[in-house]
């Protein structure tokens, strides 16, 4: 998965925050979908936690068809960008101990 290298990280962070706010306080499915799209835009711009969230959305089929392949791709990207949440999820999926000692 190739991501743009010229994206302003503050823009991706703002997209992620906006998307999470919409998803978290959605009173209608359309609002949740808009939030999920903002999170996806932030992930595509290289935001690690947005990619981790998008991986979860892909895995459970939230505002999109379920797709385990894409979920794992996003999870690997998020881990590569520094997301400890993503690294812990990959460890869990591999049957290894997470950083929290679970």
Image (cartoon, rainbow, N blue to C red):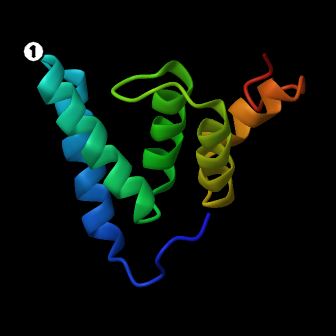
Rendered position, 58 above or below 74: above
Q: Position of residue 62 (x, y in %)?
A: 39, 23
Q: Position of residue 65 (x, y in %)?
A: 45, 27
Q: Residue 54: in sight, yes or no?
A: yes
Q: Position of residue 40 (x, y in %)?
A: 37, 48
Q: Residue 21: in sight, yes or no?
A: no
Mark 1 closeness class: few <14, some 14–19, many ≥20 residues within 10 Å: few
Q: Position of residue 80 (x, y in %)?
A: 68, 59
* Residue in the foreground of this view, choosing between 25 and 65: 65
Q: Residue at 51%, 19% (x, y): give it.
A: 60
Residue at image mark 1: 27
Which residue, as the protein is rendered here, is positioned at the far bottom? 6
Question: Which secondary structure lies at badge 1?
Answer: loop
Count the numbered circles shown. Answer: 1
Rendered position, 63 above or below 11: above
Q: Residue at 31%, 57% (x, y): give it.
A: 13
Q: Residue at 33%, 45% (x, y): give it.
A: 39
State left or right for residue 14 relative to residue 57.
left
Which residue, as the protein is rendered here, is positioned at the far front? 65
Which corner quadrant of the image does residue 21 belong to?
A: top left
Figure quadrant of the N terminus: bottom right
State left or right for residue 58 relative to residue 9.
right
Q: Residue at 17%, 19% (x, y): give it.
A: 29
State left or right for residue 78 relative to residue 33.
right
Figure quadrant of the C terminus: top right
């Amino acid at each position: 998965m190739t991501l743009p290298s010229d994206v302003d990280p503050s823009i991706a962070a703002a997209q992620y925050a906006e998307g999470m706010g919409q998803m978290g306080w959605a009173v209608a499915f359309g609002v949740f979908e808009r939030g999920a799209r903002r999170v996806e835009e932030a992930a595509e711009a290289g935001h690690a936690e947005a990619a981790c969230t998008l991986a979860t959305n892909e895995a459970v089929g939230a505002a999109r068809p379920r797709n385990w392949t894409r979920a794992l791709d996003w999870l690997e990207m998020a881990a590569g960008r520094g997301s400890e949440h993503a690294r812990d999820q990959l460890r869990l999926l591999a049957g290894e101990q997470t950083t929290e000692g679970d």
